[in-house]
């Protein structure tokens, strides 16, 4: 079995380098083009299931991919991006200037730090790995099935860290591009990273 992790296309927030976790910001024109391109690249792969975050930037990307396969997109709320709380909609420079103490706390302990009104990486790790286990539990890992999961940069970083390290220690080791193809193939029951940002 092969899992394709796809980050949504570019958004207005991405282009302006603003924090967008649970903020439901739409794809921009570039993002719409990226979604169409990745859908075209995946169209000849026999996809058996597509899962998506409910946020429109991911769901719209997933629907574009699904249009080539006749597969209904299954929404999983647990695949939403990390909640950045009071940082939602702010750019890094503003946060650096106005909330440097909070930013330093994040740098010092990224796993446990929680933005006010938001969530921590560990909390995101718990919900995303739980839903991932739920998605694959009834699948035959030795099959030739192909499953697509459309989510967010932080979510995919979290899941790749889980698959490679079993915890959040690899979270910052993965940089996930908009609509890059990240491919994990199960070999004898073990997840093998076959591509990052392909």
Image (tube, grey):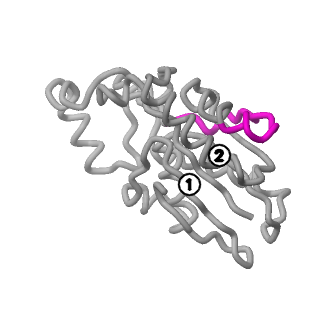
Regarding mark 1 in the picture, which secondary structure is present there? helix
**Residue 66 x %, y %:** 72, 37
Q: CA distance from mark 1 to mark 2?
A: 11 Å
Regarding mark 2 in the picture, which secondary structure is present there? strand
In the rendered image, the vertical position of residue 138 relative to residue 121, given as above or below: below
Front-most of residues 76 and 149: 149
Residue range corresponding to the magenta coloring: 65-81
- Residue at 61% x, 63% y is 184
In terms of image quadrants, where is residue 65? top right
- Residue at 79% x, 65% y is 144
Which residue, given by chain and number where applicable, does mark 2 sit on? 149
In terms of image quadrants, where is residue 188? bottom right
Residue 159 is labelled as: 1
**Residue 74 x %, y %:** 76, 35
Where the N terminus falls, by quadrant? bottom right
Q: Earlier in the sequence, mark 1 or mark 2?
A: 2
């Amino acid at each position: 079995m092969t899992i394709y992790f796809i980050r949504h296309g570019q958004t207005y927030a991405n282009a302006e380098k603003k924090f967008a976790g649970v903020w439901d910001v739409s794809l921009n024109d570039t993002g719409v083009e990226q979604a169409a391109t990745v859908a075209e690249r995946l169209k000849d792969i026999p996809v058996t299931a597509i899962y998506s975050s409910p946020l429109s930037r991911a769901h719209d990307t997933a629907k574009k991919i699904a249009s080539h396969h006749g597969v209904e997109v299954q929404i999983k709320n647990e695949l939403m991006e990390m909640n950045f709380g009071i940082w939602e909609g702010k750019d890094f420079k503003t946060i650096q200037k106005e909330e440097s103490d909070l930013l330093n706390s994040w740098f010092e302990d990224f796993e446990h730090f929680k933005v006010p009104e938001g969530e921590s990486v560990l909390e995101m790790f718990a919900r995303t790995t739980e839903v991932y286990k739920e998605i694959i539990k009834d699948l035959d890992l030795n099959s030739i099935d192909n499953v697509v999961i459309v989510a967010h940069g932080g979510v995919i970083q979290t899941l790749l860290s889980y698959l490679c390290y079993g915890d959040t220690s690899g979270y910052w080791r993965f940089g996930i591009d908009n609509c890059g193809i990240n491919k994990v193939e199960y070999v004898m029951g073990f997840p093998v990273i076959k591509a990052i940002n392909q």
